[in-house]
Image (cartoon, grey):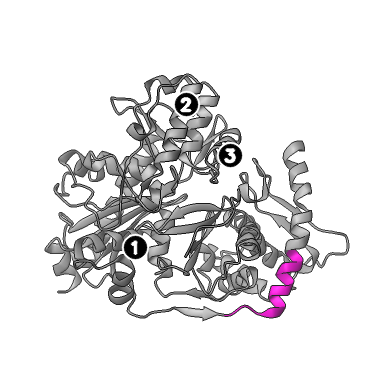
């Protein structure tokens, strides 16, 4: 069947992911290839010290993204999108959405970007002997207890962004296990929340005067391949207010952007890993065994099937690059040149390859927000150089990309040096890799391991979410996700591989020494600016 017939027959599968700056929809056919796309740009806001998106932002963003997809279908195939084989929803992980028994949001959505739960994260990490990052939902809940927040007296349920969307569409309060592992620690054996840790938290909350049973207010955990409900009439109208989309469509478990990134890069097997680089940057390494020690820089989450994953998550990546590109574009416009924004990125990235391997002594911190890996609760974008530094555009371009990778390297070095976890190959995707070779080559230097980029890397998490939904619909009996991806989706595609260059590895190591020392400058900027 061709794409038009597949869509007309209601056999296409839809994945939608709520990223930090874009909501993206990808429609795939029976070969798992994208056949239509939609998007909606949005941006978080800092309100009363909280990074947030409003319910209106979420609702209107979803509807505009779906409208964009439906319009793409009409333009490409001359037909109206009315029915689908399945839908899957994903979003940026972590954060805190708290609701009362009537389903009303109690406090504004607190996103992953907030660094406001330091006391809670530290105390829970000690209680569980398990790293609880500030981004995690349980840290937000416990910090609210420490703050004696009034909304807790009415708390009936809390979840993440994709859990909220799925709930609105199906009525089911569930999460995929990968996303759930960013709310609360998972027991790898039971494939559910860790029961001993839940008991410890319940006792802790009671000591603070709260009669909260954590198991009653967390979403139910599901695995990839499980059924997660069907689109209700109200849910169909929530996506498509025109009433054109039909109800009854099956939905798979909602997953976080970490899980969809692993799926989109075919890195869900043990000893595989991936880097996702956009507004934030994170690396995932699927482990063969548990870590020996607890590290505040290393999160333990899971694949969509529940395998243990070491995750290094950094809050800041490409936003500062974007800011400099916008400034350069303003200058060129003022000078009378009409140059497409994409050209600025192309020039900047390609010139970076000609810069000195240590950036000529330039130093840049891309911290728009705090960065847990390097111990900062707040951020101040900062560019510093010595009087004798080699200040030219090539080095400036290179230091921007190095800065986007620096915090990630700090975290991955802990795995390499302290846990002897070797990275055979990393699959990379995201905005940092849109310009061919550059981000890939410099990433290989940063982590001192081969980095592969697939031809499908640009499809991103929305495509990965569509694949998870297709797995639920198409898997054979006892077929695991790893084999489904390897044999049916990627069919042996290993992508384009770049090995680390020893001179660039040495140069990045020199840069990172200066970067670590210069963190005192960044801390001073936070205190004094």
Marks 1/2: CA distance? 40 Å
Relative to the observer, which residue lies in front, 65 or 19? 19
Q: CA distance from mark 1 to mark 3?
A: 38 Å
Q: Earlier in the sequence, mark 3 or mark 2?
A: 3
Q: Nearer the viewer, residue 442 or 27?
A: 442
Reading the image, the residue beneath label 1 is 463
Looking at the picture, how far across and down is residue 65, in whole percent? 33, 51
Observer-nearest of 202 and 42: 202
Look at the picture and state if 59 lies above or below 484. Answer: above
Residue shown at the point (75%, 50%) measured from the top left:
519
| Magenta run includes residue 509 | yes
Say which label, 1 or 2, has the lower sequence index. 2
Q: Which residues are magenta?
A: 499-511
The answer to whether 204 appears left or right of 386 in the picture is left
Position above or below: 207 against 439: above
Q: Which mark is residue 205?
A: 2
Instruction: Please report the residue visible at 31 percent of the width from the left and 61 percent of the height from the top.
Output: 37
């Amino acid at each position: 069947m061709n794409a038009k017939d597949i869509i007309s027959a209601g056999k296409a599968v839809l994945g939608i992911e709520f990223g930090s700056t874009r909501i993206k929809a990808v429609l795939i056919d029976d070969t798992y290839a994208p056949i239509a796309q939609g998007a909606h740009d949005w941006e978080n806001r800092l309100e009363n010290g909280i990074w947030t998106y409003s319910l209106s932002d979420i609702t209107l963003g979803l509807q505009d993204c779906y409208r964009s997809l439906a319009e793409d279908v009409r333009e490409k195939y001359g037909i109206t999108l009315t029915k689908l084989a399945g839908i899957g929803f994903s979003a940026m992980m972590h954060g805190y959405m708290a609701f009362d028994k009537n389903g009303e949001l109690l406090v504004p959505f607190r996103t992953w970007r907030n660094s406001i739960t330091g006391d809670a994260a530290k105390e829970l990490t000690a209680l569980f002997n398990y790293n609880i990052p500030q981004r995690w939902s349980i840290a937000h809940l416990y910090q609210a207890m420490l703050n004696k927040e009034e909304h807790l007296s009415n708390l009936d349920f809390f979840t993440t962004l994709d859990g909220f969307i799925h709930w609105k569409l199906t009525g089911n309060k569930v999460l995929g296990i990968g996303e759930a592992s960013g709310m609360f620690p998972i027991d790898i054996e039971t494939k559910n929340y860790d029961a001993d840790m839940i008991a410890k938290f319940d006792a802790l909350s009671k000591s603070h005067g709260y009669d909260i049973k954590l198991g009653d207010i967390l979403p139910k955990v599901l695995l990839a391949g499980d059924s997660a409900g069907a689109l209700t009439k109200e849910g169909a109208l929530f996506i498509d207010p025109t009433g054109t989309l039909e109800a009854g469509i099956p939905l798979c478990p909602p997953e976080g952007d970490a899980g969809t990134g692993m799926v989109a890069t075919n890195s869900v097997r043990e000893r595989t890993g991936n880097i996702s680089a956009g507004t934030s940057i994170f690396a995932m390494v699927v482990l063969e065994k548990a870590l020996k020690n607890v590290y505040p820089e290393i999160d333990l989450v899971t694949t969509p099937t529940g395998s243990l994953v070491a995750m290094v998550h950094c809050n800041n990546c490409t936003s500062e690059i974007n800011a400099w590109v916008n400034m350069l574009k303003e200058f060129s416009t003022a000078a009378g040149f009409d140059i497409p924004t994409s050209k600025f990125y192309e020039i900047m990235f390609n010139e970076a390859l000609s810069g000195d391997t240590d950036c000529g002594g330039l130093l840049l911190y891309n911290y728009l927000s705090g960065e847990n890996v390097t111990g900062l609760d707040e951020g101040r974008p900062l560019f510093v150089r010595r009087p004798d530094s080699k200040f030219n555009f090539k080095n400036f371009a290179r230091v921007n990309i190095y800065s986007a990778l620096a915090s990630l390297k700090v975290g991955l070095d802990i795995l390499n040096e302290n846990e002897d976890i070797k990275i055979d190959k990393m699959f990379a995707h995201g905005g940092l890799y849109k310009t061919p070779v550059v981000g890939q080559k410099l990433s290989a230097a940063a982590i001192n391991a081969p980095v592969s980029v697939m031809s499908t890397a640009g499809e991103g998490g929305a495509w990965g979410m569509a694949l998870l939904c297709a797995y639920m619909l198409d898997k054979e009996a006892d077929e695991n996700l790893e084999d489904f991806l390897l044999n049916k989706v990627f069919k042996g595609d290993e992508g384009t591989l770049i090995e680390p260059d020893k001179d660039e590895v040495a140069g990045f190591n020199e840069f990172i020494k200066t970067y670590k020392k210069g963190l005192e400058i960044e801390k001073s900027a936070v205190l004094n600016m």
